[in-house]
Image (tube, rainbow, N blue to C red):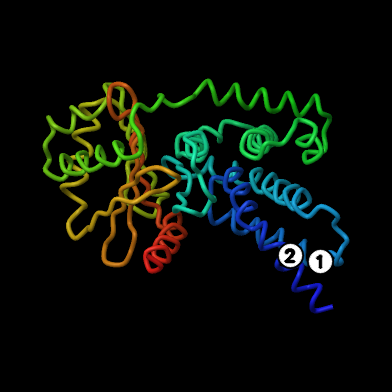
Amino acid sequence: MDGERDEAVREFESHRQRLFSLAYRMLGSAAEAEDAVQDAYLRWHGTEPGQVAAPGPWLNKVVTNLCLNRLTSARARREEYPGTWLPEPVASGALGPMERAEQREAVSFAVLTMMERLSPPERAAVVLRDAFGYSHREVAGVLDCTEAAARQLHHRGRKRLAEGAPHPGTVDAEQNAALLGRFLQAASDGALEQLEQLLAAQVVVWADGGGKARAALRPVHGRVNAARFLAGLFERFTDGVRFELAEANGAPALLGWEGEELTAIGTVDVGPDGVTDIRILRNPDKLAHYAHRHRALSQNG
């Protein structure tokens, strides 16, 4: 019996990373995704050995339904969220290999933020279909609806995402990282003219403090306003901060450390005319998962 249970644990662990990837895309929160995966494990543990003929699809359905329930309550919480809500970042490797640009874009802050526009069933249909290659019939099986309804959910979800699609990127990851370095230097020096040259005319700065760290409650729009805001931010709040260039959600990110504590993560989106969106995450609750995994990866070389 113990041997069967050990095998069941090994079976679940072989699916864990994929289940986390599914839950994260559904929820936009690493902490909530881990909770959903753990709840799925408890349900898996409660089955009899050999009871589930196809563990992968069964676990995908369990996690999807757990996430659908969580999304319903999360929507109410986010309506009361102080200031801008941004997705929780994840470190390299947490979502598995992302060799293609399309894979990285699917978990970008821009796309995960836009996913909030979708209803929970639309979000599930888009994630299962686009990220996991489910057919409309398989999506229908997970969501307990007809194939036609699944097709319509996916169509509506894709349409809503297209309506708010981010500006197309024009640089690769290496160039993006170099631009982040120039951006950091200009902002640190308070060089408004140089900073403005890096920004698109309609740039927007989004900051998420969650009511637990100082952050702008509303987005800052426009090149001049954004440059002044960022220069002021660096002047007032970066004493004693160590900056590090790393990766979050498959893209270059700027980390701000105060001692051993991660206090900020910044990312940029780049369009034909320069930086179009700047996202600064300062909510400590959303930084904990990333910081823990980043430290572990650093210690392992």
Q: Disc 2 versus disc 1: distance between alpha carbons?
A: 6 Å
Q: Position of residue 135 (x, y in %)?
A: 74, 32
In the rendered structure, which amino acid carries the disc numbered 2?
Answer: Leu
Which residue is depicted at the point 29% across and 36% down?
A: 175
Q: Is residue 94 above or below residue 121?
A: below
Q: Secondary structure at mark 2?
A: helix
Instruction: Characterize the local packing of mark 1: few (<14), some (14-19) or many (20 or more) Cα atoms within 10 angstroms.
Output: few
Q: Which residue is mark 1?
A: 46
Q: Is residue 25 left or right of residue 203?
A: right
Q: Position of residue 16 (x, y in %)?
A: 64, 58
* Dot 2 and dot 1 residues touching (CB under 8 Å): yes
Instruction: Characterize the local packing of mark 2: few (<14), some (14-19) or many (20 or more) Cα atoms within 10 angstroms.
Output: few
Q: Which residue is mark 2?
A: 42
Q: Position of residue 67 (x, y in %)?
A: 67, 47
Pick whichever, 183 or 164, lies toward us.
Answer: 183
In the rendered structure, which amino acid carries the disc numbered 1?
Answer: Gly
Pick whichever, 162 or 74, lies toward us.
Answer: 162
Q: Is residue 35 left or right of residue 98?
A: right
